[in-house]
Amino acid sequence: MEKVLLGHGSGGRIMHSLIRDRLAPAFEMDALSDAAIVDAGSCGRLAFTTDSYVVSPLFFPGGNIGDLAVFGTVNDLSVSGAEPLYISSGFIIEEGFSMDQLEKIVSTMADAAKRAGVRIVTGDTKVVDRGKGDGIFINTSGIGVLREGVSLGSTMIKPGDRIIVSGFIGNHGVSVMAERNGLTFDPPVLSDTAPLNGLVKDMLDVCKDIRIMRDPTRGGVATTLKEIASESGLCFLIDERTLPVTGGVRGACELLGLDPLYIANEGILIAVVPQYASDRLVDAMRRHKIASESVCIGEVFDPAASGLVTAPASGTVLLKTSAGGTRVIDMLAGEQLPRIC
Amino acid sequence: MEKVLLGHGSGGRIMHSLIRDRLAPAFEMDALSDAAIVDAGSCGRLAFTTDSYVVSPLFFPGGNIGDLAVFGTVNDLSVSGAEPLYISSGFIIEEGFSMDQLEKIVSTMADAAKRAGVRIVTGDTKVVDRGKGDGIFINTSGIGVLREGVSLGSTMIKPGDRIIVSGFIGNHGVSVMAERNGLTFDPPVLSDTAPLNGLVKDMLDVCKDIRIMRDPTRGGVATTLKEIASESGLCFLIDERTLPVTGGVRGACELLGLDPLYIANEGILIAVVPQYASDRLVDAMRRHKIASESVCIGEVFDPAASGLVTAPASGTVLLKTSAGGTRVIDMLAGEQLPRIC
């Protein structure tokens, strides 16, 4: 009998097949966008999204499940081009969980909502028997209003577009893994958990023609790039030397046998933008505290017009490595880091 | 060190204190309504709600966690006076859960959404290690558009108003308890899980002045009545002889030592309505298949004008028992039926 595996939750290829082949068809919904864009009658276009947070451990350097849950949903709305407004919070608490820890998490959520400028307006609390949960799981759903004149989507991507990442990659995943394994780094690797709505607003002020934005959470930058490229039908060429990775993350990855490209992030975004606006966008982004390391990491090309002897299949992501070679980037296959968010 | 108890999740008094004293103040939100009414800029007024479902067992006579999750959120929106439109689904699945059961649940959710006329537009899937969950937990959040001219709330309640219940009470809770304990009844007691949006629409067509509606889920009819009475500052007098209880539920409650008034329901509502519209509303409601047993169960009175020698405190719910006495109805204190939804 077929069973659900841990890898079905880790953002990679087998999670995608679960969603694409089983869930999305049943619900007749689009499979992979961060938020649904819905028509609310006279209300116009809203963005609506949901995420459950099951991160383990609950507290990690730089954050805890509380800010992760608020910022994660704020970010899903933000990268879909919406202004996040309202958040719901659904708690599933294991019997025996410390009331002190619950209060710490709740107060972190309240602070996070203030920082992001959203309101937590509705909630629900369930308690399950000891041994039937794991401390606390939090679902947050969110509503945002779509900005006028903004229409993001992978179909907008054109050859020559530039690919931007807004900050150091891999920090969230490494901070959680370090905490889980009792490792400490000097200086410590902190989760990058942060709200992206202010950054996105400024980016759209600079250029309304941004093609698409995504926050590379589960599965990391590689999986997100592969998702976008596949949807666009075009190919991406990424220059490994431009990828912003701190020494701490690089060292931790070598120690733990991980690839920073596949590690979850919670406070950065990837944007595909028109070439003409790329430099101006990077400049504007760098003025943000959470995006001071913004950089163009690659570009979009049409495989049919690539001039390569063997043209890559559409949807291919190529990485020009620091060593000078080129390798194909695929989605995270199974499970690299379970319960990272 | 203070810890979270099972009773913190069962809809009764200690859950209310957790929400009222700790969660609601932190988030600066209204504590107990089924859905938040929010202003979405040019979008007007929306209703937004969330609920996590942790029912055990997952399958029970008359339904499973899937339709429960869809109808529960549809109903929270409905009783707040909104037309439910969009639902999100967040799955937390335990590693090793059967893919067959997942598909059954997903297909039940899809059917439930069709029946209720809502769309499941966004979703999320997380997997937790074996032993850190319990098969599957589902969060659904929902968005609805508030009907024009409808303004429900406990402050609208006036002395002389009538209290209506839309159907047999206790069926959902008894069906889950029976399944959990391996009991079967003849005829079987089926969960009443059903969408209330059609019923609510027809009720509001008959009378826009309905004061308030609630679906009496966790904590049952008694807890919901006590909630509404407390918020209104008035008192309710309920006539036990009018309460619709099937022989099956009555028998099961005697067997299990339960009180039908405190048992969860998933397909009925309680409405407080102006006296002048009460009969017309009951007539209209009875034309609905899911509300054919609708009945007026009591009325609202002003304790200061009650003429009783010792006036009850405001917010008191009195039950005139079948035996001719009168008793005070309070909220469910701790935990009668954990994980009932």
Image (cartoon, coloured by chain):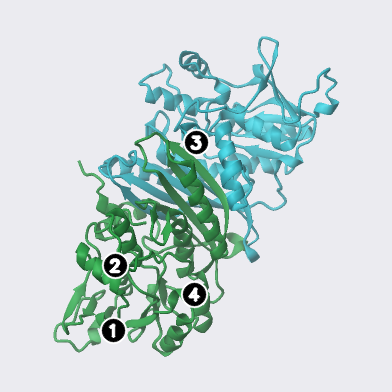
Chain colours: A green, B cyan
Give the secondary structure at mark 2. Answer: helix
- The reply to whether residue B229 is visible in this rendering is yes
Q: Helix, strand or loop at disc 1?
A: strand
Residue B109 on image: x %, y % = 41, 44
Which residue is found at the position 46% from the left and 46% from the top? Answer: A101
Mark 4 and mark 3: span between their CA atoms?
38 Å
Q: Quadrant of the N terminus of chain A?
A: top left
The picture places residue B165, in percent across and down from the top left corner, at 63, 29
Q: Would you place residue B17 above or below residue B149 in this image?
A: above
Q: CA distance from mark 1 to mark 4?
A: 27 Å
Q: Is residue A222 visible?
A: no
The residue carrying mark 4 is A199
- On residue A223, the disc is 2
**Residue B9 badge:** 3
For image coordinates 45% across by 26% down, the residue present is B190
Residue A199 x, y percent position in the rendering: 49, 74
Indicate the secondary structure of the residue bearing disc 3: helix
Count of marks overlaid on the render: 4
Does residue A119 lie above or below A322 as drawn?
A: above
Label 1 crowd bin: few (<14), some (14–19), many (20+), radius 10 Å = many
CA gap, disc 1 and disc 3:
54 Å
Against A234, residue B238 (above or below) is above
Q: Residue at x 38, y 19 (%)?
A: B183
Q: Are callouts 1 and 3 both on one chain? A: no
Which amino acid type is shown beneath numbered disc 4? Leu
Amino acid beneath label 1: Phe
Give A171 or B164, whichever is nearer the viewer.
Answer: A171
